[in-house]
Each structure stands twice: as structure tokens, then as C-alpha cells.
Image (cartoon, rainbow, N blue to C red):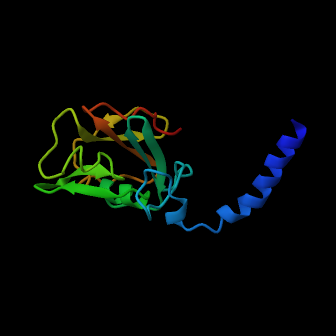
Amino acid sequence: MKRHRNSLLAAGLVLAPLASLMTPAQATPVGEPAGATQRAAACPRGTGVSVVVDFGAWHKISCAPGDPVSGAAALRGAGFTLTMVQRFPGAICRINGRPTVAQDACVVMPPATRYWSYWHAVRGGKWTYSTLGPGSYNPKPGTVEGWSYGAGTPPTPAPPA
């Protein structure tokens, strides 16, 4: 058992430096679009806008550094890719390839049971449904933006504290 553990430790010491040589596209997890920026944490307190994206079993918290001018800019700044609804370009249809093209072609508005709802929160607070679209709302640095796919329920992960 000790010999096996030492072998695993040695393999980790050899492979760990190689991970730093990978480009973002190479480091992209399975199921993520190639070239997507990977940030895996909320912004440090008081800086940037933290973004929570919840697609059921898949969810991610990332940081949009600085002061993004809109909710859509915060999503992009946090490394997410967006696809807008073709006939209503103010609405987001797909975030990081979710839902898939087979699930929604993004031509018309999706049904009320399968859409990206938009939420805001203060750090450690409660989600509040957005009354503005992602192109009209200007999030303040230090706040949290949330996106949840489904029937308009808030993101499952709580706003980061």
C-alpha cells in the first residue's frame, strides 16, 4: 500500500508541472467549448463581479474582473460563451453550449419551463430576479450575478459569501 501511494505521489510530482504548460483550450474540461476561459472562483471581496451559472448538475462560479458595463459583459468577462435568441437578440439562449443545439435551436424565445433566468445578489445574500435584461442591467463590482436554466427558479448555488 505504501509503495502504491509513493508511486502515485511521484507521478503527481512529474505531471503537475506539465499542467502549467497547457493552453486554456487544452485545459478545457470535457463538455466545455474549446478555447473557453476557465476561472473557477468568485471574485475576491470588493473586486469584480462574481458570476454563478447553474444548469442542473453542471454549475460554475467565476469572476468577471473590473467593472463590467452589463450583465452580458459580466458573463463574457467571467469566461462564459453566449448565444442569443435569433428573433429576440436581447435574450440569452445558450451559455457555454447549454442547452445544446438539439435541445434548443435558439431561433425563437424558449418556453417558460426551459430558459435562462437572470438573478442578482449581494455577496452572501439572497437571489433577486432581475427586472432588466442582461444588456440593460449594470452590475456593481463586489456583487453577484446569477443564471439558472429551467422554469425561473434561482440558481442552486447560494451567492458566494
Image point (83%, 42%), residue name: 5
Image point (29%, 48%), residue name: 100
Report the front residue among 23 and 78.
Answer: 23
Image point (22%, 41%), residue name: 131
As drawn, the residue found furthest toward the right would be: 2
- Give above or below for 78 relative to 58: below
The quadrant in which residue 128 appears is top left
Q: Is residue 94 left or right of residue 80?
A: left
The quadrant in which residue 121 appears is top left
Q: Position of residue 37 (x, y in %)?
A: 47, 61
The quadrant in which residue 99 appears is top left
Image point (52%, 48%), residue name: 42
Report the front residue among 5 and 104.
Answer: 5
Q: Position of residue 6 (x, y in %)?
A: 86, 46
Which quarter of the rendering shows the N terminus?
A: top right
Q: Position of residue 156 (x, y in %)?
A: 41, 32
Residue 21 in view here: yes
